[in-house]
Image (cartoon, rainbow, N blue to C red):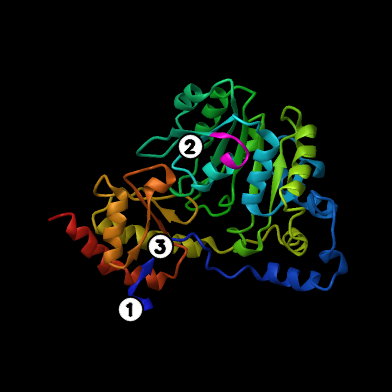
């Protein structure tokens, strides 16, 4: 109706980069390998687990052995396997808002109760005191998402250390880190396993290697976690009985051969800078994100759903912050062509002008 060139779709966090050549060659190399298409232990191929363990151990004051790694069907599969293993019906899981919307569904999938705690409204930094106040005898876990979707914020070492001091050791930290290699301007994603005693990392290669459709990820369990061996046995079991059985075999082998590869973050940085400049020129307040590929500006009106509907009239597709537990904001995904961002300039200016009348 309008022509694709006149619609500016910033609604979906779908990486548009090509996977690194190293990954594609690894896939070609393994595709005719008979073992790449057969069952393996539910936790994954032993040699793949070893390579992941060595990678995760980098920067930690203690090593991660291969027995503490479980390959998963992406980070979503890993999060569900972990919650299934940890939760009894009625157990509570703290979620920091703004949050990835599907966390609430994942928690409820396994009889858990989400407990939403707001972060700082200006910086989106975790509020350790608010988290501490939300802990009850039924609190089983806290989900971190660093860098964060939808804000692009990278939680600092100081903020995470304050959280570690605020949490009792009965609470397990689930650190969801699919954007951990998409950071800019020297930002550091602290090693969670070195900060929290009871923690596990849930990671995927969807963003770092531009492989979202391949559904390949892993869980790394801290050897310092209480009853770590029992949890690992439970993770292998839940990985199976949830219907995943095992992570995709070909992709396990391919990513294990490409752990040092990554998409070009410079491309995303250029897009971030361009879209941020347009959005702020149009009059919207928006902090500069340190990671991931999202902007999270303030809505100029309290009703962010109404605002997103108004933006759609200017052919700008965004997502209301209410869906992330943060009403009054809206999310823009800049994993789209720079040409789309540049063409959206006048539409954003027209949209902003409507709220300066």
Say what secondary structure mark 1 lies in.
loop
Gap between marks 2 and 3, in whole Å? 23 Å
Q: Residue furthest right?
A: 34
Badge 3: residue crowd in 10 Å (few <14, some 14–19, many ≥20): many
Using a 10 Å C-alpha cutoff, classify the residue at mark 1 as few (fewer than 14 neighbours), some (14 to 19) or many (20 or more). few
Q: Residue at x 60, y 42 (%)?
A: 109
Q: Name the residue under label 1.
A: 1
Residue at point 67% right, 47% down? 78
- At x 59% / y 51%, what residue is drawn? 178
Q: Where is residue 114 in the image (x, y as percent from the top left)?
A: 52, 35
Mark 1 or 3 closer to N-term? Answer: 1
The residue lying at 80 percent from left, 69 percent from top is 30
Image: magenta residue range = 108-113
- Rounded to the nearest angstrom, the CA distance separating label 1 from label 3 is 19 Å
Q: Earlier in the sequence, mark 2 or mark 3?
A: 3
Answer above or below: position of 230 versus 242: above
Q: Can you identify the residue that label 3 sits on?
A: 10
The residue that disc 2 covers is 96
- Quarter occupied by the C terminus: bottom left
Residue toward you, 117 or 206: 117
| Element carrying mark 3 | loop
Question: Are circles 1 and 3 on residues that touch, CB within 8 Å?
Answer: no
Q: Is residue 99 left or right of residue 31?
A: left
């Amino acid at each position: 109706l309008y022509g694709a060139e006149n619609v500016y779709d910033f609604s979906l966090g779908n990486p548009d980069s090509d996977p690194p050549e190293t990954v594609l060659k690894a896939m070609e190399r393994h595709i005719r390998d008979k073992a790449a298409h057969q069952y393996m232990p539910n936790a994954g191929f032993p040699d793949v687990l070893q390579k992941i363990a060595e990678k995760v151990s980098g920067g930690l004051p203690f090593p991660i052995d291969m027995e503490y790694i479980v390959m998963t069907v992406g980070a979503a599969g890993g999060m569900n396997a972990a919650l299934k293993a940890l939760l009894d019906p009625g157990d509570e899981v703290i979620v920091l808002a703004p949050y990835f919307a599907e966390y609430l569904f994942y928690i409820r999938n396994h009889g858990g109760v989400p407990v939403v705690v707001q972060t700082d409204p200006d910086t989106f930094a975790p509020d350790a005191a608010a988290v501490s106040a939300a802990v009850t005898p039924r609190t089983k876990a806290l989900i971190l998402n660093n860098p964060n979707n939808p804000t692009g914020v990278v939680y600092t070492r100081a903020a995470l250390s304050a959280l570690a001091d605020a949490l009792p050791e009965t609470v397990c930290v689930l650190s969801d880190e699919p954007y951990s290699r998409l950071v800019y301007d020297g930002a550091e994603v602290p090693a969670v396993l070195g900060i929290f005693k009871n923690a596990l990392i849930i990671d995927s290669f969807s963003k770092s290697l531009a492989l979202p459709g391949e559904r390949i990820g892993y869980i790394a369990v801290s050897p310092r976690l209480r009853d770590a061996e029992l949890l690992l046995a439970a993770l292998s079991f839940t990985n199976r009985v949830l219907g995943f059985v095992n992570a995709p075999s070909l992709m396990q082998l391919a990513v294990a051969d490409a752990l040092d590869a990554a998409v070009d973050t410079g491309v995303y940085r250029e897009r971030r800078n361009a879209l941020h400049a347009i959005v702020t020129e149009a009059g919207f307040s928006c902090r500069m994100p340190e990671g991931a590929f999202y902007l999270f500006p303030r809505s100029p009106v309290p009703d962010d759903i109404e605002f997103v509907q108004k933006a759609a009239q200017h052919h700008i597709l965004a997502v209301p912050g209410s869906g992330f537990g943060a009403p009054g904001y809206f999310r823009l995904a800049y994993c789209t062509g720079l040409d789309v961002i540049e063409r959206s300039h006048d539409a954003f200016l027209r949209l902003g002008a409507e709220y300066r009348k």
